[in-house]
Amino acid sequence: MSKTTAQGGGAMEDVGQLLRKTREGRGLTLEEVAEATKIRSVYLEAIERGDLSALPPGVYARGFVRAYAEFLGLDGNEVLIQSGLSARAAPLSQEVSGNGDVSTLSQPGRIRRAIPQIAASAALLAVLLGGYWFLANRHPGSAPPASQPNGTTASQLPATPPATQRPPAPAAPQPVLQVVKRNASQYMVDVENVDQLQVVLRVGPHPCWIDAEADGHPVEQRTLQPGETRTFTGNQEVRIVAGRASSLTVTVNGQQLEPVTWDVLTYTVKKSSS
């Protein structure tokens, strides 16, 4: 009787050929299947050969065959039935010998083999219980209190004073804007509670020509395009002449000014002297 017949018969050979042809039909290598299923390639090769003697015994062999089949999209249980492995579970009173054959081991023999392990476990348990009894019956307070280098015990040391909580820092004052003049030619604003003036222009749907000065010095003169944003800063004054003010959104130190409908307009933003 051949090895293959002894371990699974022609049925396992047929299943192995089915798995191999399915794998090759999907364009997969054994290495790719091994990486995906975590089954060693030597075991996959043995399955495809129908050589169960090269596989781990019992439930491991069945698990490998089922996992391989299901990875390829086949019915794992049906493949086990076709291979004859579905009913090959060894009874509890049997063990697999080193050469893959099943040998009988009687219940008394198993008990005799387990006696040394039971004795070792009992000895370890006795040691643990003895140590617990010793620790539980020590007289409390027998150890002297820990002393500091100067001879003072820990209980005599003064308690650490609680950390002094710092009062929260006062909130910075918010900028205050006052509109001094607003007409078809002038938009004048005074600003309080700021260290520096900041004027932000956001251009709307139409281009807008500007001429900007900061503290009396020219800064920029050009046409801003729709969607563009420009920021101008000054210590005392920011002056901007806008050719199409109706297309601008103007923000002064974080506060938006009221929109206008005029075109040519001069914005004058000053730091308040009060």
Image (tube, rainbow, N blue to C red):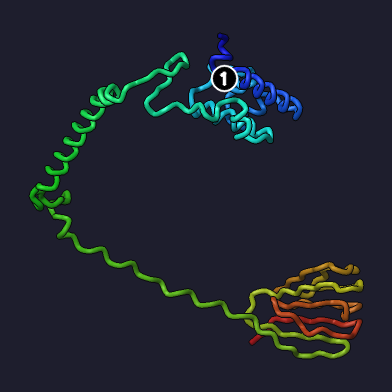
Looking at the picture, tell me which residue is in the foreground, 94 or 171: 94
Compared to 190, does 102 lie above or below?
above
Q: Is residue 114 left or right of residue 238?
A: left
Identify the image quadrant of the N terminus.
Answer: top right
- Is 141 placed above or below 158 here? above
Q: In the figure, 235 relative to 64: above or below?
A: below
The residue sitting at the top extreme is 1
- Residue 68: % across, % down: 62, 30
Q: Residues within 10 Å of mark 1 (few under 14, many from 20)?
A: some
Q: Nearer the viewer, residue 134 or 22?
A: 22
Q: Nearer the viewer, residue 90 or 205?
A: 90
- Residue linked to disc 1: 8
Residue at point 61%, 80% (across, down): 174
In the picture, residue 269 is in which quadrant? bottom right
Q: Give the x, y percent position of residue 212.
A: 83, 73
Residue 77 picture location, percent across and down: 60, 35
Element marked by disc 1: loop
Q: Residue at x 24, y 30 (%)?
A: 118
Spot occupied by residue 8 in the image (x, y as percentages of width and height)? 57, 19
| Residue 67: quarter of image | top right
Amino acid type of the residue tagged 1 in the rendering: Gly
